[in-house]
Image (cartoon, rainbow, N blue to C red):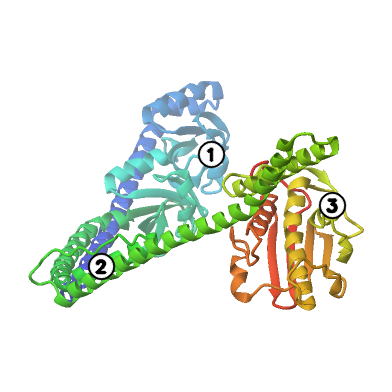
Amino acid sequence: MLSLGFAFYFVNERAAAAAEDELRRGLVEAGTLVDQHAATRTDHYARLTRVVADLPKLKAAVETADAPTVQPLADEYREEVNADLLVLTGRDGQVLGSAGADAGEIPGLLLDVVPVQSVDEVSTFLPSGRGVLQLVSAPILLDGPVPDILGRLTVGFFLDDRLAAEFKKLTGSEIAFAAHGRILASTFPARSRPFLTGVIDSPSLTPVTIDQQDYFVLARPLQGVGSSQGNGPIALILRSRTERLQFLNAIRTGLVGVLVVTLLLATLLSYGVARTMTRPLAAITKAMRDVAATGDLTRKVTLKSRALDDEDARTLAAAFNTLTESIARFQREAAQKERLSSLGRLSTVIAHEVRNPLMIIRASLATLRRGRLTASELREAIADIDEETTRLNRVVTDVLDFARPIRFELAEADLNKICRASVEAAWAGEAPDEVAFDLDPSAVPVVTDAERLRTALVNVLTNAKHAVQAVARSSTGTDGPASVAVVDAPTVRMRTRFANGRAVISVDDRGTGIALEDMSQVFDPYFTTRRAGTGLGLPIAKNIVEGLGGTMSVSSRVGQGTEIRIDLPQSTTTPTEA
């Protein structure tokens, strides 16, 4: 590879240098052709001008100094000479006839170059909006012992875009004509001409970039009577370095191709040798990545039998397959145990929450069967059946809340009023005197589902009530129901705060607290540390709060109490189902 790289560098440098030299020589030759063609063109038009100026018919017309007589001849001779403009002036420089664009300005411009009565021929160049204007002027002389100057014949030809295109065909180069620091005509589009302005006065070959192509530029002054080397019109000859060096790209491509093919062959050979050793390891690595990405422990490492494969890698693949099979088996067993555990917790819920209402209903039905009941006894039995049926329906509703989305009915509500109603519901039949309220007096109405939020708060407050009751029982040494009044008040505190478009509700109790190992499970369905608990209160509350666009968090320390914090938006924008 190093030898091929050196060969590539050497050939590329030598070929590039040779191409650069050839380009420079070709550009100089093109400049010479432009000089020769310009000189031949000037000589040709000078001869035509002298011939026309010496015509007797023209002399006779100019001698009359009558413009109507001279003008037809100006039109006629311009067509014959095929000039862009033609001007005939009299003895005093007055215009007797003109044909072509801008012809009227020529006499005044010529006076700056040669006097009217001069017998000299003039060849000069002037800048024009169309390009560079080449003028050839000859005197109109009346033959005699002393020549009599009747006037002057001036013929003009434009060095414009058309002529630049002709020069391009002749030289195989791009051509531009410039004067007074401006590009007046060229074979380039008008948008490219500003790039040439900076190289007009360059003394030698100069590089320039036009339209993402590199060119060499050679400047050639256009000489004529009245023009100078420093301020006269200039012809710029350009040849594309990019085009001239295109053949190098083929060489480079060929050499790069050789390098690439050699590198590929070397790589393939090395790869083929390495694969006999690394193929088993690659298969194992791929299987590990698939397992890590998908968790699918059914992926196996399959190795084809090859004579050169590494035996240790085969052993490792077999060990990996055995490991994944073992983990998959353990996962299946764990999932089965979890399903059985969930089923057991659900059975406990049904046994506790459903059996007791059924027993009360059964007792009420037995009372109804006795007959001869008083109206009061009949109403009491019917009320018991209705109450327990409602309780059973509530249990079923709690369980279904985990199996289907909760529907919300949003409306404006007073959050402080909801908190007070929740306390009354949680302490139904008991005096909630041990609950301290710290409600924000600057509360504003919130958009929420008041009934769903009340249900969530009741579940939270019920847990707080049970926690402080457990402390009360431990302090009295009794196992039955106990009032929390034996604990220093307040045992439960409910607080609300409003700020930054959010409403915060916190329930703080001085109960038993939650063990550290149980903190991660407090929101899991059916998880409970109470014998009579269902394990659905806090999970239901969390589902409701999150459905209302809020968050629910818990902090606790064993023996000191628990705080549950609910953060809600003041304007709930959740859909009616979450």
Residue at 33% over, 62% down:
297
Question: Could you tell me which secondary element the residue under label 2 belongs to?
Answer: helix
Q: Residues within 10 Å of mark 1 (few under 14, many from 20)?
A: many
| Residue at numbered disc 2 | 321
Q: On screen, 78 above or below 148?
A: above
Q: Is residue 266 left or right of residue 474?
A: left
Number of other residues with Cα within 10 Å of mark 3, as a class: few under 14, some 14 to 19, many 20 or more: some
Q: Amino acid at mark 3?
A: Ala
Element assignment for label 3: helix
- Label 3 or label 2, whichever lies nearer to me, is 3
334 left or right of 262 in image: right
Q: Position of residue 308 (x, y in %)?
A: 9, 72
Percent of width and height locating residue 249? 24, 58
Determine whether the residue tagged by mark 1 lies in a helix, strand or loop. Answer: helix
Q: Earlier in the sequence, mark 3 or mark 2?
A: 2
Which residue is labeled 1 in the image? Answer: 106
Name, please, the residue furthest toward the right: 441
**Residue bearing mark 3:** 421
Q: Look at label 1 and name its amino acid.
A: Ile
| Above or below for 504 versus 398 | below
Q: Quadrant of residue 52?
A: top left
**Which residue does the image show at 78% across and 57% down from the upper left?**
502
Q: In the image, what residue type sits under mark 2?
A: Asn
User: Which is nearer the N-term, disc 2 or disc 1?
Assistant: 1
Q: How many marks on residues?
A: 3
